[in-house]
Image: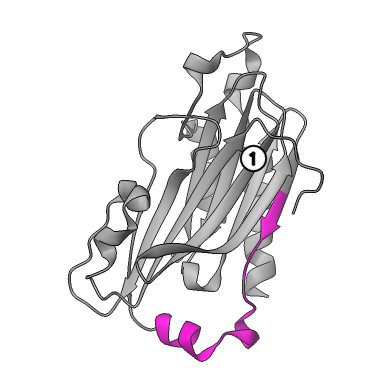
Amino acid sequence: MKIKKLFMVLTMAVITLGISSCQTDAKPNSAQMYIEPAKLTEQEQNILNLMVTDDKENLIVDFKLDDNVKSMEISQYRLVDGKWAPESKSRRIFTDNEGRCAISYERLSEGMRFALQSEKEKGSTSHFTPQDKLTDEQISLSKIGVGTTKLSNKTKIEYEKEIPLVLQVITSKNEIHLVLDSFDAPESYADKNYEAVYMITVKFSQQEIENAG
């Protein structure tokens, strides 16, 4: 089944791809906290190319933190009336100083999946709508154009602040405006009249959580 295949692809990719930065014993301090696109070795890239099909998008990021981290959260939003409305959130306890996260998706109107790997954490979470349960709107959105931009530079991490990772616009219009930093200014898309605008963010926190999900 398509969704099961994607699950295997993403899980294998994150487990297979090593975190080379874990080889150092140095502890990052708050001034060194950052997230950036993963620098894959040639072997890692070849493995990824074998497993990921052309119709799938993916983003693999590495991040460094300090000893104060207690949890992390991956969120998917949809722009509704000029504001970001949450569609899914995955919170988990996370206390490692560094890690790697992979996000896989096609059209965010149908969901996404992310996988996490660090010294003490390995796992993945899916927020996909099964093909046989797609709504009329989801089916309609699957038939029009899509444009995507994603994190491309090293970005400073601040606790309790969401960092945009992926922005996707689904529209029948010929021109698509894509600015990842627009998470802080969703109103900039209010007059575009796109059929759908989605954003994926990550947030690291010093706050402990009791239950992950």
Q: Position of residue 129 (x, y in %)?
A: 62, 75
- Residue projecting furthest to the top: 26
Q: Residue at x 62, y 8 (%)?
A: 26
- Please provide the residue range marked out in magenta: 124-141
User: Position of 143 compared to 205: left or right?
Assistant: left
Q: Which residue is mark 1?
A: 72
Viewer-side residue, 62 vs 97: 97
User: Position of 129 compared to 121: left or right?
Assistant: left
Q: Position of residue 50 (x, y in %)?
A: 54, 52
- Residue projecting furthest to the left: 175
Viewer-side residue, 7 vs 111: 111
Q: Secondary structure at mark 1?
A: strand
Q: Residue at x 53, y 32 (%)?
A: 62
Does residue 76 belong to the magenta stretch?
no
- Residue projecting furthest to the bottom: 136
Q: Quadrant of the N terminus?
A: bottom right
Q: Residue at x 64, y 86 (%)?
A: 133
Query: What's the amino acid at mark 1?
Result: Met
- Vertical arrangement, residue 101 with respect to residue 29, above or below: below
Residue 52, can we see it?
A: no
Q: Position of residue 59 (x, y in %)?
A: 48, 47
Q: Residue at x 47, y 86 (%)?
A: 137
Viewer-side residue, 43 vs 111: 111
